[in-house]
């Protein structure tokens, strides 16, 4: 008598197809095409058997244990993947941990000697991954409304070493399903479930999923999950090989039963593209034992992955924060202080650039360009320039569609220096002090570009050893020149670093330089072609609390109106914003009172984000709680707060944060940089 377990994948598909055709023709559900032995077998049993059989190894077995991974980002992705256990198989030990009921892989599956992971335990029946604070995605055939309360989502079921399985798990890492938020199960289409668990998941990053469009043909992918119920495995070396279906794509992933519900990542973007749901059979008989069923990379049927876009609309919030260990990705020396990032656009192809002084004393650049990922350049070696004596600041200047990079700093020789890159010429060096014949700087330099009717100029501002505010500026064939800003404006002397930006209003470009004065007030020096350099005492104009340190500024253009924004920590410990709008002039907002966010522990850094014409404001800082924080303003929601450390599950910062935005295809992303308490360079990003 034929049983579903005895049937091949092709036979099961033929039986299900025959039933569907009979129903379409008006036949009864029990009128089978060729096998009367299946008359009493329900359609659902055939579907479940078909799904369970469809897994396989393609080409070389690329599966690896998590302890073998060297990429910190891969390990963090794995931290957000859960093993699904039945409630009865998770036994509370009474000491804050629970024991997972497992069996030996080789024994329970009758495996031949030499089969990978043969001596490891198995116990999970499916995989899942974190897509919201308390929401886990998995395959639709893994869980439904009837079984949701009987499932335990276990994080951390993995191998610590070659013979060290984690089968005693802290109860804090075990979550109970409480509600099914959405569910679809079809044998040859979408197959997914979204489950709300009993409490928010802590210490793990929410994995970002694709929300529109689809992955490109042949793009590389990887998968993380629990093949056959084993401890977590990572498998890359795969690619998309079928991309025509609306609800799923096909890839040659090395997966088995138990991988169902695993997240499938785009290797280029680290975004979850889909959920592993079905594929080829797992094993083949070899005498008295079984081995993995082998397929060439382009052979067999491939593994089906339900597209994340099918269920992404049910997820909130959209596009959560993520984390990248830049030191690990760029294989660069550790930073010795703060990082500074900027974006360069070359013909619609943006690249990211992060500059800093390393613990080796040299100037370094980490740069990202498309599929190449992060790379490293030793700027000191390339530019043959003096070593920096502190932080670096970078910016981009566009001359007729040909962008150039510029990095300015104070050198160990006390002078102001510029490293600059232009196309095929590579990196070069300019001694700004010599060219501008200006006083030596007393600390950090800040550079920026102003565009006047299509003609760009460079500007570098700093406090000099004479205590005064100075500007070095470059304009076309004139080369570098110097302006004593204090002499021109008769403003109070600065008490620390200067920060500047430019604004275009009614077609006219202006410059704005901000600092805390020796009188404790917040000050602005501003240049307009009709008025030249002028001074505004911002504290006097706004009656805002005095700053306790450096000011940071940015401009925002929304609905054709340009506004200015200045951020700082006040002597009251709060985060503050001073803002200028042409209809209201200068005003003040206490951001801490507005958002009830933790107090900053130092400088507050602001930037603006334009998404499809809607412009939002963002201010980032390290809090007194040690975490990285974001205060954000949107015209529909006003000011809000996000704990970036919690959302991205990232290391704590060891000092100031810096944020910027980068356009990426149809949208724009946020990027926040800092040096971590682990000494490494880190990026938090939101796309």
Image (cartoon, helix red, strand yellow):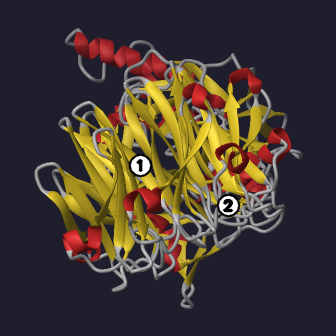
Left or right of 315 in this view: 174: right
Q: From this viewpoint, which residue is outermost toward the bottom?
A: 95
Q: Say left or right for 572 vs 108.
A: left
Residue 441, given in percent of the width and then of the height, sits at: 64, 62
Separation of residues labelled 2 and 1 (CA atoms): 22 Å
Q: What is the secondary structure assignment of the residue under circle 2? A: loop
The answer to which image quadrant residue 590 occupies is bottom left
The image quarter in which residue 503 lies: top left
Residue at (63%, 30%) from the top-left corner? 371
Task: Provide the residue designation for mark 1.
Answer: 501
Report crowding for label 2: few under 14, some 14 to 19, many 20 or more residues within 10 A (C-alpha): many
Return the disc, 2 or 1, that comes first in the chain's sequence.
2
**Front in this rendered view, residue 643 or 96:** 643
Dot 1, how many residues are within 10 Å of its Cα: few (below 14), some (14-19), or many (20+)?
many
Q: Residue at x 62, y 58 (%)?
A: 339
Q: Residue at x 81, y 61 (%)?
A: 361
Residue underneath mark 2: 440
């Amino acid at each position: 008598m034929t049983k579903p377990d005895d049937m091949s994948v092709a036979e099961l598909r033929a039986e299900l197809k025959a039933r569907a055709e009979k129903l379409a023709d008006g036949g009864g559900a029990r009128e089978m095409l060729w096998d009367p032995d299946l008359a009493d077998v329900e359609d659902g049993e055939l579907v479940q058997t078909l799904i369970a059989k469809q897994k396989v190894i393609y080409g070389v077995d690329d599966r690896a244990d998590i302890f073998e991974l060297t990429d910190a980002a891969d390990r963090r992705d794995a931290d957000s993947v859960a093993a699904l256990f039945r409630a009865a198989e998770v036994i509370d030990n009474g000491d804050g941990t629970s024991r997972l009921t497992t069996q030996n892989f080789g024994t329970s599956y009758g495996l031949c000697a030499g089969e990978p992971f043969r001596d490891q335990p198995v116990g999970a029946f499916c995989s899942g991954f974190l897509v919201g604070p308390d929401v886990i995605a998995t395959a639709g055939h893994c869980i439904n409304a009837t079984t949701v309360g009987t499932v335990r989502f276990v994080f951390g079921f993995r191998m610590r070493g070659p013979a060290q399985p984690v089968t005693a798990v802290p109860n804090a890492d075990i979550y109970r399903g409480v509600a099914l938020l959405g569910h679809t199960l079809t044998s040859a289409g979408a197959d997914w479930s979204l489950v709300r668990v009993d409490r928010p998941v802590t210490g793990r990053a929410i994995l970002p999923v694709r929300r529109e469009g689809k992955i490109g043909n042949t793009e590389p992918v990887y998968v993380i999950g629990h093949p056959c119920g084993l401890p977590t495995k990572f498998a890359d070396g795969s690619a998309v090989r079928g991309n025509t279906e609306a609800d799923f794509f096909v890839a040659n992933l090395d997966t088995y039963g138990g991988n169902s519900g695993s997240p499938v990542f785009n290797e280029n973007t680290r975004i979850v593209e889909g959920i592993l749901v079905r594929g080829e059979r797992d094993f083949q008989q070899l005498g008295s034992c079984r081995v993995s069923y082998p397929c060439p990379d382009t052979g067999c049927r491939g593994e089906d992955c339900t597209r994340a876009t099918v269920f992404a609309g049910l997820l909130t919030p959209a596009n959560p924060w993520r984390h990248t260990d830049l030191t690990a990705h760029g294989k660069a020396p550790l930073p010795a202080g703060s990082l500074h990032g900027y974006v360069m656009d070359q013909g619609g192809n943006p690249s990211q650039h992060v500059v800093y002084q390393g613990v080796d004393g040299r100037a370094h650049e980490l740069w990202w360009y498309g599929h190449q990922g992060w790379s490293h350049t030793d700027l000191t070696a390339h530019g043959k320039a003096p070593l920096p004596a502190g932080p670096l600041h970078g910016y981009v200047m566009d001359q007729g569609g040909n962008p150039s990079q510029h990095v300015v700093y104070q050198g160990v020789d006390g002078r102001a220096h510029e490293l600059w890159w232009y196309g095929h010429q590579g990196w070069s060096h300019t001694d700004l002090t010599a060219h501008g014949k200006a006083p030596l700087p007393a600390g950090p330099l800040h550079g920026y570009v102003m565009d006047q009717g299509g003609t760009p100029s460079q500007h570098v501002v700093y406090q000099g050893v004479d205590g005064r505010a100075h500007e070095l500026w470059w304009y076309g064939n004139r080369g570098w020149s110097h302006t004593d800003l204090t002499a021109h404006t008769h403003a109070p002397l600065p008490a620390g670093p200067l920060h500047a930006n430019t604004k275009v209003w009614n077609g006219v470009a202006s410059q704005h330089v901000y600092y805390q004065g020796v009188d404790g007030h917040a000050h602005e020096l501003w240049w307009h072609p009709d008025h030249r350099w002028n001074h505004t005492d911002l504290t006097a104009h706004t009656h805002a609390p005095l700053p306790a340190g450096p000011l940071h500024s940015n401009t925002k253009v929304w609905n054709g109106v340009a506004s200015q924004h200045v951020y700082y920590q006040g002597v009251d410990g709060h985060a503050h914003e001073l803002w200028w709008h042409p209809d209201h002039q200068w005003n003040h907002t206490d951001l801490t009172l507005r958002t009830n966010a933790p107090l900053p522990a130092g400088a507050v850094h602001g930037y603006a984000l334009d998404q499809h014409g809607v412009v939002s404001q963002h201010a980032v800082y390290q809090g007194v709680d040690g975490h990285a924080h974001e205060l954000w303003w949107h015209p529909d929601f006003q000011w809000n707060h996000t704990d970036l450390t919690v959302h991205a599950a990232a290391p704590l910062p060891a000092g100031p944060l810096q944020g910027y935005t980068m356009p990426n295809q149809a949208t724009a992303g946020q990027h926040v940089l800092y040096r971590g308490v682990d000494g490494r360079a880190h990026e938090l990003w939101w796309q």
